[in-house]
């Protein structure tokens, strides 16, 4: 029996959208961190990076990597939960199909004819 692809639930669509935006945010911060660390350009971005480093103790690079890692871990958790739910529904339908196939047909016994004839 082939496993049918089902439509995504509303929760999955919202969760993946939010986590995608969170991942993009982390990726942008990571790229800004790389630009600040490895390009020797005195711009407002470097001053912003130094301000963030003084206030929070981390640069754009580490903040971006942390946000990116959190979004990836959350996406994997959502994916695993929904895969488990899908597998459980698939196994349930397989057990039901096997149970219905195993159920014996009602046998009709012909009592009008005698065995001696």
Image: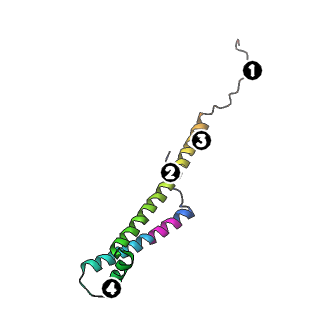
Question: Magenta segment, which residues?
Answer: 14-21
Q: How many marks?
A: 4
Q: Give the overall secondary structure of the magenta segment.
A: helix
Q: Residue 104, how many percent across, how many down?
A: 63, 31
Q: Which mark is residue 96?
A: 3
Q: Is residue 85 magenta?
A: no
Judge depth for marks 4 and 1 and give the one in front.
Answer: 4
Judge depth for marks 1 and 2 and give the one in front.
Answer: 2
Residue under pointer 2: 84
Label 3 to label 1: alpha-carbon separation = 34 Å
- Picture layout, residue 46 above or below residue 109: below
Mark toward the start of the polypeptide (3 vs 1): 3
Residue under pointer 1: 111
- In the foreground, 27 or 1: 27
The local crowd at label 3, few if under 14, some if 14 to 19, many if 20 or more residues have their Cα within 10 Å, is few
Residue under pointer 4: 47
The local crowd at label 1, few if under 14, some if 14 to 19, many if 20 or more residues have their Cα within 10 Å, is few
Asked whether the beta carbons under mark 1 and mark 2 sit within 8 Å of each other, the answer is: no
Q: Secondary structure at mark 3?
A: helix
Q: Secondary structure at mark 4?
A: helix
Q: Residue 92, how many percent across, how many down?
A: 57, 44
Q: Residue 65, how many percent across, how many down?
A: 36, 69
């Amino acid at each position: 029996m082939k496993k049918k692809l089902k439509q995504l639930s509303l929760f999955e669509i919202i969760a993946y959208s939010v986590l995608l935006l969170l991942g993009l945010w982390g990726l942008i911060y990571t790229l800004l961190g790389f630009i600040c660390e490895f390009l020797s350009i005195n711009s407002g971005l470097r001053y912003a990076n130094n301000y963030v480093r003084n206030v929070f103790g981390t640069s754009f690079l580490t903040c971006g990597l942390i946000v990116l890692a959190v979004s990836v871990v959350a996406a994997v958790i959502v994916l695993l939960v929904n895969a488990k739910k899908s597998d459980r529904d698939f196994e349930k339908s397989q057990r039901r199909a096997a149970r219905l196939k195993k159920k014996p047909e009602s046998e009709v016994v012909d009592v009008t004819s005698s065995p001696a004839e």
